[in-house]
Each structure stands twice: as structure tokens, then as C-alpha cells.
Image (cartoon, helix red, strand yellow):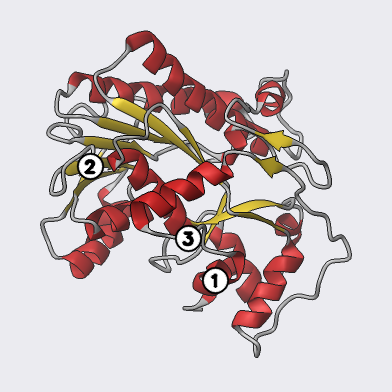
């Protein structure tokens, strides 16, 4: 028996985001109803139209929550929901931690409080990030496990101003994810709410972009390289792990519905990549396309992700899937409509 019943309603915050839209897609495909939050009606317009056309009207209900920083922001949205997936975050990539981290922590707290006040809620899932555990460190062998936290970015983010360092924005983002997830587990430990909680830590997400107007997050890197070439700011992004966004969505769904998954950090890491492996996948998918030449720097992510096997087990058990979707297929999906 699933932990939450098919046909019940799941709240998905930030429902117009790249990962969130795939979570919505998989929930609707599996027979759940979704209530999604967006910051403005305009941001939700294409989302509503897309899923109404795909699954019929009445399965997705979008509500406007202008600011997750406001206490009680999600109190109305969560009413009657059996599950909550908190995906919304601050992705402004400001170099000033005071512009990012407090709003993330407030959003975490307010979503948890709303779920705690709603008796119908049985499951809570938080979208964390690989950067909550570590920052990419090419050509260095190290191990990532369930106890890994990105203290490096927390220290860098909260270092004294001026906030001008080139990598400050990435460390502020990483710190927001690390401290946001830590806040989730602190709340669970101290408040002992009536619902079960899990977190999902995805790395760079590639794969299908549902709408061309969408801010496609890391999938936008692949789209932009294919259509515009490798810009200097993208070339500076270090090699790391990736995951297909559909696998990320399915791991969220499993964290919601699998009664055996409790108090887990699920590491959504499929395999490492670098730009040369991306280029090779592009050439295979579109032999006639103009793809950038390989970089001389062939640095690689050498980290070992111990919880990867657990995530693969979850995909097999819940969806009959034999491991993660690979890089070649993910890149093909990413550029298939371009």
C-alpha cells in the first residue's frame, strides 16, 4: 500500500520550476492530483495550460503564493493535501548571503509549519541539492555519504564582505541548500511532526524541457551550448555528476509514496560528466549539428557517491527501472526539440 493514496492531492511548491514541473508531470501520470504554488499568475499560465492539455482539466490546481518568506504563506495551500513536496527556493544567485539564505530558511520553516498544522499530511519531501553535501572538486578522489555536508560553502558564503568574489554566488547557493536541508532535519528532530520526511539531493539535471519559455536551470546549459556554443561562463562550470530530471522526479515520488522510505537523504547522482562527454553525446544524437570542439582540459569528477546504490534500488523497487537514465539519452532528450 502506498504511503499516500492515489487520487489524493499533493502540494508542490514552486510548481513552474524545471524539476518541479517534472514532479507534477509524474504525479499526474500516476493518478495523483496536484496543487502547485507559483509566485504570480503569469508564471503559472503555461504550466496550467500544458498539464490541462496533457491530463485534462481538474487535475492541477495552481495557487499564488507571492512570498514564501511570509509567515503562514502555505497555510491555505496545504489544506486537504496528503503529501507536500517543497521545491521552491531562492535561485537568484546573489553573492550576498543575506539576500538568499534567510529567505530559503523561512520558506523551509513556513512549509513545515503549514504541513504540521494540517492533519491530512502524511509525507513531506524537501528538494535539497548535491551542493548541500559537496561542491564539485575536479581531479580529486573523495567520498560522499549520507553524513556529508558542504561546510566549505557555508563558511565561504558567510565570510566577511565585500561580496565580490567570482565564486561567491555558487557558495551562497550551496550554503542555502545545505542550511536549508539542515533546517528540515532540525525541525523533524525537535518538533517530531505527525508526518514522515525525506529529502532528495539531485546534482545537475539534464533531460527534456517541457516548455521553451521555461527557465530550464541546468538543462539550460545543454540547450545553450547546443544552440549558441560554449560561452566562457559555462566553460567555467566544473565537471560534476548529473541526473536525468525524470529520475529526479521519480525519486521524489518514491520518497512520497514508498512507506519503507523514512527519514532518508536520497542522493540523485547518476554518473559524472564533463564538457567533452557532453559534446560526444551531442554528436551522437545529432551527427549533422555543429558541436563545439573538445576542450584541452579534460578534468573529471572523481568523487565516489556511496548512497548512489540506494537511489538505484529505489527506482527499481518502485518503478521497475534498471538504474538511472544515462548521459547520452539525457542529452538527446535535452536537445531533441531544438
Between label 2 and label 1, give the one nearer the viewer.
2
Q: Quadrant of residue 31?
A: bottom left
Horizontal side of 78 relative to 218 (left or right) equals left
The answer to which of marks 3 and 2 sits earlier in the sequence is: 2
Kindly identify the residue that appears in the image at 72 percent across and 20 percent down: 159
**Any mark on residue 127, and which?**
none
Instruction: Name, please, the residue furthest toward the top.
Output: 190
**Quarter in which the N terminus is drawn:** top left
Question: Which structural element holds mark 3?
Answer: loop
The residue pinned by badge 3 equals: 322
Dot 3, crowdedness within 10 Å: few (<14), some or many (≥20)?
Answer: few
Residue 281 image position (x, y, % from top left): 65, 74
Dot 1, crowdedness within 10 Å: few (<14), some or many (≥20)?
Answer: some
Q: Nearer the viewer, residue 71 or 323?
A: 323
The answer to which of marks 1 and 3 sits earlier in the sequence is: 3
Horizontal side of 223 relative to 210 (left or right) equals right
Q: Nearer the viewer, residue 144 or 316?
A: 316
Question: Which structural element holds mark 2?
Answer: loop
**Any mark on residue 2, and which?**
2
Is any part of residue 229 visible from this angle?
no
The residue pinned by badge 1 equals: 329
In the depicted structure, whether residue 182 falls above or below residue 43: above
Residue 100 image position (x, y, % from top left): 53, 30
In the depicted structure, whether residue 120 falls above or below residue 330: above
Task: Check whether the beta carbons of the residues at disc 1 and disc 3 lie within 8 A of each other.
Answer: no
Residue 28 image position (x, y, % from top left): 23, 56
Instruction: Name, please, the residue furthest toward the bottom.
Output: 288
The answer to which of marks 2 and 1 sits earlier in the sequence is: 2
Horizontal side of 187 relative to 167 (left or right) equals left
Instruction: Report, in whole angstroms, how far the alpha carbon at label 3 lies from the one at label 2.
Output: 21 Å
Q: Quadrant of residue 82?
A: top left
Amino acid at each position: 500500500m502506498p504511503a499516500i493514496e492515489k487520487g489524493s492531492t499533493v502540494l508542490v511548491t514552486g510548481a513552474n520550476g524545471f524539476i518541479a514541473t517534472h514532479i507534477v508531470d509524474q504525479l499526474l501520470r500516476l493518478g495523483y492530483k496536484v496543487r502547485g504554488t507559483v509566485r504570480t499568475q503569469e508564471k503559472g499560465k503555461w504550466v496550467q495550460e500544458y498539464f490541462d492539455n496533457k491530463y485534462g482539466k481538474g487535475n492541477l490546481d495552481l495557487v499564488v503564493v507571492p512570498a514564501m518568506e511570509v509567515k503562514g504563506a502555505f497555510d491555505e495551500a496545504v489544506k486537504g493535501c496528503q503529501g507536500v513536496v517543497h521545491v521552491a527556493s531562492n535561485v537568484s544567485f546573489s553573492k550576498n548571503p543575506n539576500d538568499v539564505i534567510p529567505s530559503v530558511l523561512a520558506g523551509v520553516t513556513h512549509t513545515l509549519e503549514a504541513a504540521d498544522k494540517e492533519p491530512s499530511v502524511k509525507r513531506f519531501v524537501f528538494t535539497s541539492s548535491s551542493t548541500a553535501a559537496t561542491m564539485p572538486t575536479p581531479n580529486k578522489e573523495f567520498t560522499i555519504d549520507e553524513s556529508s555536508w558542504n561546510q566549505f560553502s557555508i563558511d565561504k558564503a558567510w565570510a566577511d564582505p565585500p561580496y565580490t568574489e567570482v565564486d561567491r554566488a555558487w557558495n551562497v547557493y550551496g550554503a542555502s541548500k545545505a542550511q536549508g536541508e539542515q533546517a528540515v532535519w532540525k525541525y523533524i528532530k525537535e518538533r517530531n511532526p505527525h508526518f514522515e520526511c525525506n529529502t532528495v539531493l539531485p546534482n545537475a539535471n539534464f533531460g527534456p524541457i517541457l516548455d521553451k519559455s521555461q527557465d530550464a536551470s541546468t538543462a539550460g546549459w545543454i540547450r545553450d551550448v547546443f544552440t549558441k556554443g560554449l560561452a566562457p561562463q559555462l566553460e567555467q562550470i566544473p565537471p560534476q555528476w548529473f541526473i536525468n530530471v525524470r529520475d529526479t522526479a521519480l525519486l521524489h515520488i518514491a520518497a512520497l509514496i514508498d512507506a519503507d522510505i523514512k527519514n532518508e537523504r536520497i542522493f540523485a547522482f547518476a554518473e559524472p560528466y564533463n564538457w567533452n562527454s557532453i559534446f560526444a553525446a551531442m554528436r551522437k544524437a545529432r551527427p549533422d549539428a555543429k558541436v563545439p570542439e573538445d576542450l584541452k582540459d579534460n578534468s573529471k569528477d572523481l568523487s565516489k557517491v556511496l548512497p548512489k546504490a540506494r537511489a538505484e534500488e529505489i527506482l527499481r523497487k518502485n518503478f521497475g527501472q534498471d538504474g538511472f537514465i544515462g548521459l547520452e539519452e539525457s542529452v538527446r532528450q535535452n536537445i531533441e526539440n531544438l
